[in-house]
Image (spheres, rainbow, N blue to C red):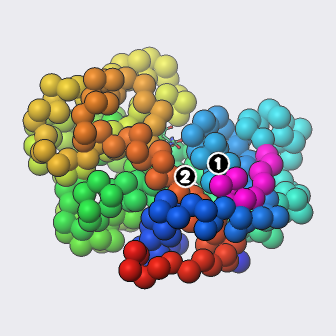
Amino acid sequence: MRSLIDILELSVEELDQLMNTADDIMAHPAKYSEVCHGKKLATLFFEPSTRTRLSFEAAMYELGGNVLGFSEAASSSASKGESVADTAKVVSCYADIIAMRHPKEGAPYVASINATVPVVNAGDGGHNHPTQTLADLETIRHELGRLTDLTVGFCGDLKFGRTVHSLIAALSRYNGVKFVLISPVELRLPDYVRKDILVTHRVPYKETTDLEAVLPELDVLYMTRIQKERFFNEEEYLRLKDSYILTADKMKLAKEKMAVLHPLPRVNEISVAVDKDPRAAYFRQVLYAKYMRMALIMKLLDIAVEIDEQEA
Ligand code: NCD
């Protein structure tokens, strides 16, 4: 039995297989519409979420399965003081697979070693968010046709942005990928990501505070929200919240084939006028996320469906 807590638990080959499965689901949804019949997904969300929870739920429904769960800590026994370990043991008796989001880093890992069913990390504090990475990889593959030889810019809150940490880890394994890390000094990439991933794997990267200066170099621009809920100090959030705003004017500096990604929710960091730009991929990214979660659920539940080799 396998869980997914960190994106690096999946090999590059497995990522490829998941993307091929997602593509096959998109092309032939009917073939998959009952493969999870009789199976249940529990969504344990101890932290607010719209898209990730609904995306997991839609994914399970589209596979013919059922969903149970809660969407805030206050409506769970955590409010009575139950530990994550106990919750995981209990929910294992009700569901075949668990998706857990938690404000504490490592909570889904603790759940996974106590559960008797697979646990998927749906975001743990400012740490990791592997299923968003699945969506991001599939989006880049569709928008640009490759995951190698890319200059990828990450802009905004690189300190607390968990989607950034997971995507950097995943992309570091592809050849010819370089990173441009664009953030205020206070919100730079944490040292553990820099050391464990970038330095260890000798991935070329540079850091800057100036989005416009580097925009022309990028194949992918990954915009992020300043993560208000992770700040200790409201004043600091207010000072940093509008550090970067991508506008239609700034998009003129970018390559014609650049893809703009954003895990959403967007606050102010991409002006609505950019949505009309064909390079704005963030709403397509939402759809890819659902198909990748469908592929992942099938993989973790050991449900195999033949993919036509010619299409894969
Ligand atoms: C992200 C998250 O929860 O980390 N949202 C998401 O899952 N799509 C990004 C964010 O909240 O800014």
Mark 2 nearby-residue class (10 Å; few <14, some 14–19, many ≥20): many
Quick check: 153 above or below 309?
above
Quarter of the image for the N terminus: give it: bottom right
Q: Earlier in the sequence, mark 2 or mark 1?
A: 1
> Residue 178, which numbered label?
none
Question: Can you see residue 244?
Answer: no
Residue 298 or 212: which is nearer the viewer? 298
Judging by the rendered image, the residue that carries numbered circle 2 is 290
- Whether residue 232 is in magenta: the answer is no
Judging by the rendered image, the residue that carries numbered circle 1 is 58
Q: What element carries label 2?
A: helix
Residue 185 or 84: which is nearer the viewer? 84
Q: Position of residue 290 (x, y in %)?
A: 54, 52
Three-letter residue code for mark 2: Lys
Magenta highlight range:
60-69
Q: Position of residue 50 (x, y in %)?
A: 60, 36
- At horizontal 61% and vertical 62% (from top left) the residue drawn is 30
- At horizontal 43% and vertical 30% (from top left) the residue drawn is 266
- At horizontal 61% and vertical 37% (from top left) the residue drawn is 49
Three-letter residue code for mark 1: Ala
- Whether residue 65 is in magenta: the answer is yes
Determine which quarter of the picture holds residue 263: top left
User: Does residue 139 appear left or right of residue 112 in this picture?
Assistant: left
Mark 1 nearby-residue class (10 Å; few <14, some 14–19, many ≥20): many
- Tell me if label 2 and label 1 are in contact, CB under 8 Å: yes
Determine which quarter of the picture holds residue 203: bottom left
- At horizontal 26% and vertical 65% (from top left) the residue drawn is 146
